[in-house]
Amino acid sequence: MSSVPFGFTSWRRRSPSITSQPCSRDIPRTQSPSQVQRGQADARLLSSSVSSLGYREPTRSFIPGSARDRLSPVDSASYARSVREDTAELASYVLADKKDARSPSFLTRRTSDASYAGIESSGPYHESAGADDVPVTNAETIEEVSEPGTPDDIGEHNSAPGPSILASMIKSCPRPKNTNGPTETEAGGQAVMASPGYPPVNDKVNGSSETTPLLRSKSSVSCLPDSPELSDVDDLDDIESQKPRLQPWYHGYGSVRERTRVKVRGIATTMNPKTWDKKTAWQRMVMDPVSCMPAVVLGLLLNILDALSYGMILFPLGNPIFSSLGPAGISIFYVSTIVSQITFSIGSIFKGVVGSELIEVVPFFHSMAATITVLVGEDKPEAVIATTIVSYAMSSMMTGLAFWLLGKFKLGYIVGFIPRHILIGCIGGVGWFLLQTGVEVSARMDDFRYDLNTAKRLLQPDALIQWIIPLILAIILFVLQKKITSKYFVSAYILSIPLVFYFFVLSFDSLDPQSLRDSGWIFEAPRAGEPWWYFWSLYKFHLVDWSAVLQTVGAMFALTFFSLLHVPINVPALAQTTGEDNADLNHELKLHGYSNFIAGALGSMQNYLVYANSVFFMRSGGDSRLAGFMLAAFTGVVMVIGPVVIGYIPVMMVGTLIFVLGIELLADALVNPRHKTKLLEYLTILAIILTMGIYDFVAGIFLGIILAFVSVIVNQSRVSAIRATYTGDQVGSIVRRNPTQCHYLRQVSRQTYIIKLSGNLFFGTIVGVEKKIRDLVADDAFADHPIKYLIIDLWQVTGIDYSAAEGFMIINRLLQKRGVVLLISGKDADSHIGRDLRAVGLGESSGEVKFMPDLNSALESCENEQLKALYAQREALRVIRDSPSRNLDVPNCNKSVTSPTLDLLSQSPRRNHLNTVAKNVLEEHELQRAERWRSISEPIRLMLQIFHELSDKNEDFWFRAKAYFVRREYPAGTVLFNRGDSADGFYLLERGELRADYDMPQGKLSEPIVQGTTCGELPFFSQTERTATVFAVKDCVAWFMDRENWDRLRQQENDIYQELLCISLKLTTERMNAIGNYTLANAN
């Protein structure tokens, strides 16, 4: 059913206003030449992109050809100002009578005709239309001179991270000169007291502790403000540890030279025996290393056990080609551990951190070794070994590069996006693999498969006893760990296994190591004379099959991905455990990059910060960098002498370690999360574990990545994009309108419906929005609650994909069938979301769609369209009343005159509702009052118009108040008052438009004030300060009552005084309700 909505004249052809015409009285607004040229160029380039009449919107699933790369320029801000012009012009109808000359097209123009006037490049106000409304400050305003700074301002002017206010006050306090006392020695740019009998100590190295006094004595430090010994990085800067200390590495050439000179002087002083102190030397050279020995022994024992457990099986020992490379794997493990330990001890924020080889690399390495063996061939064992070990080293260097890039570009937080249950599944897969590896190592199997032949081999008596004993020992250890909490228990338990083993060996038979090796009870001894650096001799680059190396790139990427998961978890966990608040994840990532790349360059493997070992190490007394360097040195000693011991280590000892770790990881993946995760998440964990354990480890990793994305999509799709829904009677614009208009809008505003969306709109969430709107326009729902305007607010939407944009096209077509107008608020048409919507054709060729910059503009536009029906009905009723009767057939004559307008207003139930409400409002109130008040002069008529809904007093009552008001004219741009001013009066706005800007710490808000309303009454009556800045948007005429007349009114006409107070309270209640409803709805 066709219809002609009401509209106003174009905003370009209106009377002078601050928002549309540049003049001397206007608020200045400018537009850069580049913006003008860019707008004209866009108009030329994009004018043909939407002009085709035969364009047909493709279906939602058809991607090619449906996106528009050329979009016509749309000025949403100009349209919002056009809506504001409509509001002001509608307000003029409140006080208008039939003597006012008004264009008939005012109430019949389509609003959309002026909605995108910015597309036109011509017009007298084209350049000024795009500017914002900015109030002009009064030229006579006296600038406030700030008072001198106080101690409270010390911390406010220091934007860089530094000391707290208390520390700054202490530092800036007057300091007396040091006239006597011990001498001072410059060390690191600081004034440090040289105590008698002690060599000069650099205070920056030692640092201030919790017991260091904030106020030092006069004899301990120089307090002159201009003392050259006090630098900007004084220990006093952060003595309270209230802010992180950021030490820039570069302060200019002079400071670098100064620090170098101080370092050289310090080294020279240290090397000079004359400056040595016996107590200090004894403490630093003897006592400190001795105090670190318990922690170093514990850390060394953990490194040895890890080397025997995982370094030994770095190569698949079940394969005959790699069966003799167990000692080489241990040496590789030690090299990687030493490199990581030295790197972390030098640069990590954690002084007692422990680094070790990444044990989870074993499954990936075995997969890579199997692939290379197949590609190169078992008949070329040296080539297979050379290609495999080169692939190992390359994967370590790739991991190091990935770590460094993440730290360099501060992208460590990205790893946190991976769902935790996916990581749990990967950990469980490693546990499954370790159980399988434990069986292979203990039973000396070269090819483990999940078939009957493997089961038969495992159940043979000689193999069964070899793998069942370490499995039982691992289960016992796993159970006892829950009850015995001593940190030495695990080490003692593992070390007791070889003692018990050799006790039984010596008890039943004579010690014959070779027979034990042949039967698989102890490991093969290294070749005679095989040194610890033997693995370097395996790098025979002339034998490397590079095509086979390329085939393992997928496994390298999977290994890199899995390696990246540990650091973002271990570093924050260790920081929380140790209470280190200044840990920098990106810095630690770069350190991991250095250590892994260096380890790969040295022919070793991946390494990382080990959380559990670090906690044990620190709690045992190793919370110092000296302990970390000592641990690296002792590990190097064990690496050099270690291969000799390999041939006497029982296989069940290593098998027990492998089994217990596998059981722990499987328990963490399957037992602990069973009551914490959802069913779908737990099934995902099982799928990853089974895929990694039975089929392929790398395939399980990629399955986890795919399931992570699927999990995110499913979970995000369950979260509705609809944040809230409202009807127009629940939320209205904050325009301050005349009481008659407010009364009418309260009855018809249910034809407006608001849907607020939030988050990122994609194909999974737009379905719910589409379903909501389908339900809204369904036959039954639409019959009960017909709507005319649908506002979709995108203020809290962060992004939109192509499918969601196509969903808006479907929504618009559904609304068009019902004659509902779609308004998009919260996003400008030229924002990235607005351009994405217009790229699929929304608003270009799919019907009328309005882009509004905010929700208030959209609500204001809908209210204006509804008010047009009110005044169109008033014009129709005036025609009926004023039409002369030429014959006796008056009804027919009237019908012929008024039928076009009345038929227009009654074409649908929605318009019929508007017609009925408008007729009731006009006939019961406005027309009768207009006839009575037509001959009344201002401001009495204005008071009657404003107060008639709030007071029952007539014109005789208000006539006595006329003498207390003064008529004033305000050109556009005039500031009536500023926020914080004393309220010296209030205003009755007869003509024009004002705007109140609320600028508060909680945010900013602009309230339009149109003619036929009041302004500034609440602060005036309550004798408080102004809460907003009000200025004239257009030329205004207002009636003003100042404080002097108000006092005279109270004394002479007290009843009018009391009535105005009551009216003020009623107006305040209405405004607070309107602004409160809008603010809450907009913030929801």
Image (cartoon, helix red, strand yellow):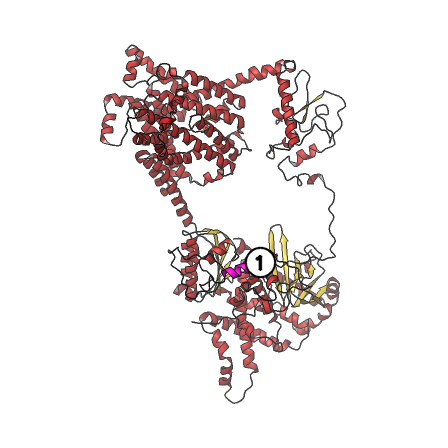
Residue 40: within the magenta?
yes
Residue under numbered circle 1: 37
> Looking at the rendering, which quadrant does residue 662 occupy?
top left
Residue 738 is situated, as x and y percent measured from the top left of the image, at 60, 67
Q: Quadrant of the N terminus?
A: bottom left
Determine the secondary structure under disc 1. helix
Residue 774 is situated, as x and y percent measured from the top left of the image, at 40, 60
Residue 612: within the magenta?
no
- Three-letter code for the amino acid on which mark 1 is drawn: Gln
Mark 1 neighbour class, 10 Å CA radius: few under 14, some 14 to 19, many 20 or more = few
Residue at far front of view: 542
| Placement of 997 over or under 700, stated as above or below | below
Q: Is residue 354 visible?
A: no
Residue 936 is situated, as x and y percent measured from the top left of the image, at 67, 76
**Magenta extent:** 35-57
Residue 519 is situated, as x and y percent measured from the top left of the image, at 27, 18
Between 342 and 474, the one nearer to me in the picture: 342
| Placement of 708 over or under 209, stated as above or below | below
Between 891 and 207, the one nearer to me in the picture: 207
Residue at far top of view: 510
Q: Say which residue appears at 50% left-offset and 73% top-offset.
A: 915
Q: Say which residue appears at 33% left-offset and 30% top-offset.
A: 372
